[in-house]
Image: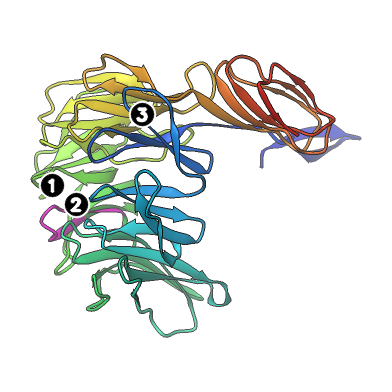
Amino acid sequence: MALATASSAGSAHSTPAPPRQSRQPDSDPIWSPDGKTVAFRRQTAVLAVSPAGGRTRTLVRRGSVTWLPRGRLGVGSVFDVYVMNADGSGKKRVTHGELPVWSPSGRKVVVGRYYQAHDTTKLFIVDVRTGAERVIRQPRCRCAVTDDSPLWSPDGRRLVFTRFVDAVPSQTSELDVINANATHLRRVVAHEIEGAAWAPKGDRVAGFDWDGSGPVVKVIAIAGGKAVRIGRGSSPSWSPDGHLLAFRGRNGAYVARPDGAAVRQLVGPTGSTCPPELSPCNPPAWSHDGDRVLWGSGASIVVSTADGTTGMTIAHGTDAAWSPKADQVAFADPRCGERQGIYVVRADGADMRRLSRHCTIYGTELRERIVGTPADDTIYARDRKRDRVDCGEGTDLVVADSVDSLRNCEAIHR
């Protein structure tokens, strides 16, 4: 918590800064496999809209979604995991757990379950059709074990995951691999690897670890754990043919061969590629033909040719995602205000369309004034204090107390 310092009677006293109102724009757009729908997050819900614009519809009111083959959706909602059709029909509960990771075929899912008594998180591999599950075994010890970040191989036959063992006073981290039927568990490397990404052939993973100067991208053989250093950076991703790696560097995006040779910087803005206040460090994304790379530099969304000869900023925002044909890019504006919302733009930067224009605003527990944005808002002001809410332009919904003073609000829930 930030502190404000004041002095009184010759001594310094630290007082907490007052709480700040929270403002959350729509975020995290993803394309359906057929390119006909863009899904995005609004608060706890996931909504969907046509990339041409129009009315939005709610896919789930609380949770996350993954597009599966045959027009199905995989859904994680609180502690339940289920599948359903894209129109919401055919809903079927699969299992319970958190952070589901679906196999490429959609026939299996990995979930995590936390056991408070032992401070341990276990991974379970679940058959989507039957609900049969297999637990990934853990070492027998008086220790806390956390298994997380599972990632399926491209053929769905294996997965890698990270394991952290807290056996006080010693702690260990490792990257492990296991078959899809939870057999033949073995260690790949005996240290932490972040951002693991399978090579298309399933024989190697790329990831990054840390030394005294920062993150280092490496390629690691699944069979023996031999590591090849690629260069300084993070968040690697493989080209579709597996011949190249793209990754984030300190001052831009880079492409290299998986043997660490031919490292070249992509044409585009220089500077920090991932300011923490804007976005998590998403990996650079390859077009389906492997000719272009989509990446972010601060708030700039960049498309560069993989040969390192050309590149251009096509928009400003975060969470950029290729359409299936790589002819369009969906992205989000990271702040509530004039530009808030989800957008789609052509890969050459033309024909930008705004798909949503919403902000969710949370008041604090103080008596205060809450001012809406120029677009559509949902405002939460129910805190038993006499607040003043100025909704402003757009179509706004406010959840308020009976004592609140409301102005220019279209829908009111008291």
Query: Which image quadrant for residue 138?
Result: bottom left
The percent coordinates of residue 164 (x first, y second) are 41, 68
Find residue 229 and name its label.
Answer: 2
Q: What element carries label 1?
A: loop
Q: Decide which of tag 2 and tag 1 comes sooner along the chain.
A: 2
Which region of the structure is painted magenta?
A: 195-205
Q: Is residue 190 above or below residue 340?
A: below
The residue labelled by disc 3 is 331
The residue labelled by disc 1 is 260
Q: Decide which of tag 3 and tag 1 comes sooner along the chain.
A: 1
Residues at circles 3 and 1 in contact by the CB criterion of under 8 Å = no
Q: What is the three-letter code of the residue carrying label 3?
A: Phe
- Label 1 neighbour load within 10 Å: few <14, some 14-19, many 20+: some
Residues at circles 2 and 1 in contact by the CB criterion of under 8 Å = yes
Q: Quadrant of the C terminus?
A: top right
In front: label 2 or label 3: 3
Query: Which image quadrant for residue 244?
Result: top left
Find residue 371 and name its label.
Answer: none
Q: Is residue 104 above or below residue 395?
A: below
The percent coordinates of residue 335 (x first, y second) are 51, 26
State left or right for residue 162 relative to residue 25: left
Who's the residue at 13% across and 47% down the image? 260
State left or right for residue 166 relative to residue 351: right
Who's the residue at 81% across and 40% down the image? 13
In front: label 3 or label 1: 3
Depth check: 363 or 194 in front? 363
Q: Does the magenta stretch include residue 344?
A: no
Q: What is the three-letter code of the residue carrying label 2?
A: Arg
